[in-house]
Image (tube, helix red, strand yellow):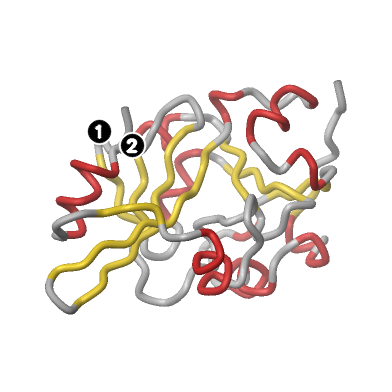
Amino acid sequence: MTDLIWTAAAERPDLLAPPVREALTALPDPGVVEVTEIDPDLADTQALVAATDIRLEDSANCIVVAGRRGEVERVAAVLVLATTRADVNTTVRKLLDVRKASFMPMERAVTETAMEYGGITPIGLPDGWPVLVDDRVLERPTVVIGSGVRRSKLRLPGPAVADLPGVRVVPGLAR
């Protein structure tokens, strides 16, 4: 089991994707966000939990979804605990007001977020993207999320997720 070394994210900008690094400076309290370096092969939540002292219930996954209403595409990021699954087909679809919501194709999500696959995070997303967060994320003392790159993870207090730009807390967003 690997013990991770956490440090203030602002002290290790080399471990952050450029849009994450930039967004951190605009947070109300950027000092609450910590970063740790990991083996890129551990970017997947299950692999990370198996190899480190991070618990599954303290990990949150960020996915990017898209849907259409007529000619208008609507995109959102969704953040849920790793112990749950986002209710994309019902709750997310209704919140986006689209006929069908689905995961954005990986290549497009990587391009539009300027983040690496396996590292997409709710911090530093494109302007105007809502971030739908399951209310259970805020109940965790700390949550571990992506950093925009595969070689590190961020940790912050669960309640602080509500202060991230574009966040809308949604009870029952995940099952």
For disc 1, the marked residue is 172
Residue 26: where, in percent of width, then height? 55, 72
The N terminus sits in image quarter: top right
**Residue at x 53% of width, y 59% of height:** 106
Q: Is residue 4 above or below residue 117?
A: above
Circle 2 — which element? helix
Residue 38: where, in percent of width, then height? 82, 43
User: Pointers 2 and 1 in contact (CB under 8 A)?
Assistant: yes
**Residue at x 18% of width, y 41% of height:** 90
- Image side of residue 123 versus residue 163, left or right: right
The mark tally for this picture is 2
In whole angstroms, how far apart are the C-alphas of marks 2 and 1?
7 Å
Name the amino acid, label 2: Asp
- Image side of residue 9 versus residue 148, left or right: right
Residue 25: where, in percent of width, then height? 62, 71
Badge number at residue 135: 2
